[in-house]
Image (cartoon, helix red, strand yellow):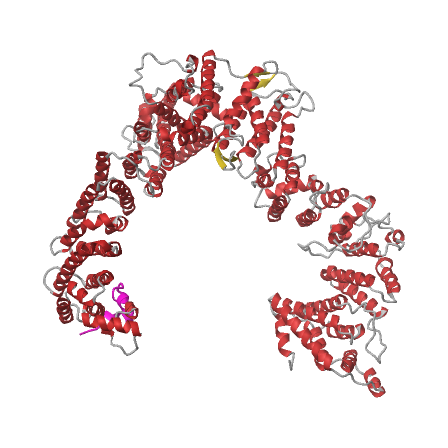
Amino acid sequence: MTTTLPLYWDLSSAVTRERIDSSVKLIRALQEFQAQFVPQLESSSEDESQSEEPAEDTAAQSLKKINSEDVCYAIRRLIRGLASPRESSRLGFAVALTELLSTLNTVTTSEILSLLLSTSQTKGSMNGQEVRDMCFARLFGLTSLVESGLLCRDATLPPPSTTPISTLEDFHSVVSELIALGEKKVWLRESCWWSISLALTALHGSDINWKQEAQQRLIEKIFVESKEWGTEKLAIALRFQSLSPEQNWRELLAPTFKDANILGTGSLNTVARILRDAGTDEEDGEVQLAPSTGSWKPQLHFAWDVIFNQYFPGTSDAPHVAPNSSFQEFFRIVVDESLFSSASSAERKSWGFLVFLKALSTVPPSSPELPMLFTKNFMRTWINHLSGEDRYLHKISRKVATEIQSLATEYPTVGVTLVLQLLGTHGNLQFDKITKTRTVESILKTMNEEGVRAYIDYLTKQFYEKADHDGVDAQSVNAKRTWVVDQLSVLVRNGAITKADDWMHSVLELLVVHGYFSITKKSEKSPFQSLRAAPRPPVSDDLHASCRTRLFACLGELTSQITLQKSADGRTLKLQGSATDGEFWVAKVLDVITGLEKDRKHVALLAEIDEDVVGLRQQAMELVKRLEEVPEAKREIAKGAELLLLALVLLSYNEDADSNNLEEATSAVARMFPAEEKEKGKKKKKKAQPPADPDVDMEEAPEPIDLLMDILIGFMEKSTSFLKAVAAHVFALVTPEVKKSTIELILTQLEKRDVMAEDESEGGDEDHDHDMEEAEGAHGEDAASESSDSDINDQEDSEEDGEVDPELRERVAEALQASGMIDGDAQSVDSDGASEVSVTLDDDQMMQLDEQLAAIFKASQTSIKKDQKVIGAQREATYFKIRVLDFLDIFVKKQPSSELIAHIVFPLIEIVRGAGTDEEQLSTKAIGLLNSRITKLKEMPPTVDVEYVKEVLEHLHNLARKAPTAPFLSTISQCSLYLSRIFLHHDQEALVLEQYRASLDDFITRKSSRLNTKFFQDFVSRVPATAWNLRDRLLELCEAGKATNIYRQCQVFDIIKVMLSQAHQLADRKDEFIAFVSGFRRVTYDSLSSACDEDGLALTAAQTKELLKIALHAVRQTKRLVPDAEDLSKIWDGESLASLSSKLSASERFKSLGGVQNLCRQLVALVSPTTGKKGAEKMKKGKSASDPPTTSTSKRKEPAEESADAPKSKGKRRKKADDQPV
């Protein structure tokens, strides 16, 4: 490279990578120039002249003696560039200068320092910005001297010179300049002292002969000449102590520090005052603090890095002195009681959060110091600022929460430690709720099995923790236990938490023990861990109910979960609702209840014992044992029946349980699996078969599966996740037993009905329901009802504030008239219910008026509540139907080849058609079931009810002809295609053609028909072989006068185009295809010929072009089956086409339209035998640029064809193509 000037530009780039690359290139180039340079010989005359020149010129002259011109220029330019007002320029020039000085052994520290000081002088004429730039230039230059190693380099200039590169005076000058600069500009103090720290470290690592003297002079400068202490001096002191522990530090640190170890326990309060940058405001005589910087910095001081290196030397290679205090003491005194104190400012608390984040990343995760970071004041400050977005430190508080979650994700073993701190003494049990975050929940997701077990042990300990004294508030104890139950429930229900059978079983056991039993005496030897301690005070009734609620919530989640199990042959089996051993979780819960029932010495059952219910339980459990031995062919159905019986048995332990379902289910399952199927040759046990109802004829009795289905539908009416999960899983297992009557039972639930009439017919007592709602609200089990009540009250308030009901106004007016408060002739009453006339009433009249008004307003409120009840009942009915649709979804998924699926189609269509505005979700789910599940089925039923499916198909087509919307018509089309495929699978093609032919006639001949071309195009593309039989009818409808208008006639051509696209599938029907094409040619030519006439209805220009395109498409499809040009010309009657082309060219309507003429020429070129052969030959040889356009059908002409049928635009190019004047 001849010059280095271009390389200086990129040093000022705002992009870091560009600055670094430019620096590397510059240094390499300068090294090459220096290597080629021959040093000058010294002369005495030059030395004498230099002594009279300024220092800058003297330094420059000395540099030129042994450095190349480019290197001298680089040094001067880089030093001057440090004063640039642009930050990127200062950084780029400083890096380049540092690297250059680190590679040169031909410059001295004094030379560079002289150049730097002379170019960075401040003058009185400078403005504030210029002074700032000069200060930064001096700081960056001095730092470059330190970091380049030039300041402490133990070497001399190249021979014959013996001048040392660095001297003691140079070191002292650099340190003095840095201290002076920091004193001059307090906002640069930290940066200056950081450079001093670098100089100290460089000095310690060097072997220079004046090392000890430099250290002594540095000690004298920092610790003897000045007794004021600031954060920077603290950092230097800690670093100096680590590098030179042999110094008399007790004397040097006095009187500020009593001990030689700055981080000793007795000195931590002083350290805290210094680190919080208290300044002279808190000076007490013994401790002299340096003046504060006057401005707050959002970054941590570098002193904290030095301190953390003292406590955790493993994170750095720098030397250190072990502190005399523990990190726990340091963090408590210096951080928690200082930066996070209640009197601390928001700025200092921000520093405290930064210190916490630094500690979080520095303290080893396995260290016992980690939980000590969550101190009292820190947790209080963190929770306060995390809970509200309007708090000053909310953003950094969120960052702290994020970093804690990241730590738990990276180290799963510390998850339980973090959770215990967040929920512990200094935290809050409702941490996530108070802070409106999911911090605890997210940490729980990251924990491994050991961490989850440890957390469960902690929760269990909290549940059984005894009160400190007898007078403790029982309500607060039960509140804490309720929180424990909630947390245990979250562990089971959260799918992201690592699951294990042992700890999940322990959680369920605790919920069972305290949900259904009361512990009368603890049993340390009991197999149930929950009995090994007795809670004091005893568990409240509300907590018993809460345990039952959480138990069923957990079972609902577990019933829906999939568990992987290894079979004996090595296959992986998917088990739903079971543990890894294959046993249902419901069964495990019943085993716990059964075991506890036998231990009457230590526990007592909460619910009263009903002998009839006990007998039903015994029958059901005996039946469950029998189901375990059914043949493999019915094993899946038996598992479904078993789960249903187990769930009903568990529900029978509830106080409000209805035993009728258990009795009916036991009877139905016994009929499904008769005792003789258990084992041939064995005598049937009578007690295993429930007694039959003598009043019911078994032949007329409902199918067992229908009885079970009725119970499952009843489950869906409930609002518990357990019953919904059991219903869905049971139905999925018993779908092979589903009959037509079962599907009808399900579909009956989807019919429209008057929900209020049903409620009244059920004989529900409003007062009783109201009492039940209040009870549920008191127990906290129905938050939704509370929310609903709140919504109603809010709506009532809004109605009171809004416009008054006219009927209510009239009734109030009548009451006021009767009392004489307003005249009978008054026409209206004001908004307060009184007229302008003032009448004085006695006490009796006022009481009478008050009663009348109370009755009026009560009636009004009753009306409002009734309306709200209607809306709520309708909403619940809709949600119930949505849940019932899940049964149909499960059935279609499990039995895709069932003939009963055809019975589902039309009822779902009716739901979509009749859905109101408040049933949008129901309609959406029904459409999804039809479009995404049923119509996508590949398997066809082996048998079919032809008459029923025919009737459904006919109804669908009738609805399609009157479809209100295009999406609804699309859904009908998909359902029609599904039923058509069923018919075709059973050789009933004629039934399909009959319906589509009738719909086609309706579409073309009836103007108000709501069908569209896509309805028929889908049919043609999905079942082309069947749709081919409609070809003759399509040609008939293309003839003039058949369609209701020209537009519908053109739509028939669109359908034919799709049919022609299936020509490749008709190779075995070549003759039929040729006959069809011939007919299509005839109607096409007739339509085009009619379009040339100006009289009567005819094709428009756009329709004509579209028809020509379809004709081109038809010719190309014909050519695929009939490649011979002569035969192709005969089929398409080339002579007639030529005549038609001439007619179009002469037509007043089309001769000026270039698009129409171009398409017509392409059509003639394809059909003509002569041009067709020439075109084929030219396609083989390669068409030249001079070939006439009429002899080619290559792709080069296709853009013209596409532009010919493009929609009209306002562009000039379009006008030239089609609208050129005659």
Q: Is residue 116 above or below residue 322?
A: below
Q: Nearer the viewer, residue 74 or 979?
A: 979
Residue 486, image quadrant: top right
Q: Which residue lies furthest to the bottom in this view?
A: 45
Q: Is residue 105 above or below residue 491?
A: below
Residue 324, image x, y percentages: 82, 45
With 337 as the anchor, is 1014 left or right in this view? Answer: left
Q: Which residue is drawn at 53% across and 30% down?
A: 581
Q: In this view, does 1019 lie above or below 1171?
A: above
With 433 as the anchor, is 1110 left or right in this view? Answer: left
Residue 386, image quadrant: top right
Residue 762, image x, y percentages: 34, 21
With 1032 as the anchor, is 890 left or right in this view? Answer: right
Q: Residue at x 85, y 65 (%)?
A: 207
Quadrant, the N terminus: bottom right
Residue 952, image x, y percentages: 24, 37
Q: Which residue lies furthest to the front in this view?
A: 681
Quadrant, the C terminus: bottom left
Residue 1202 within the magenta-colored segment of the rendering: yes
Q: Which of 1123 and 540 is in front in this view?
A: 1123
Q: Can residue 840 be seen in this view?
A: no
Q: Nearer the viewer, residue 1019 or 581?
A: 581
Q: Which residue lies furthest to the left in this view?
A: 1095
Q: Is residue 336 visible?
A: yes
Which stretch is magenta? Answer: 1200-1222
Residue 883, image quadrant: top left
Q: Which of 1221 and 817 is in front in this view?
A: 1221
Q: Is residue 265 above or below residue 784?
A: below
Residue 1142 within the magenta-colored segment of the rendering: no
Residue 642, image x, y percentages: 45, 24
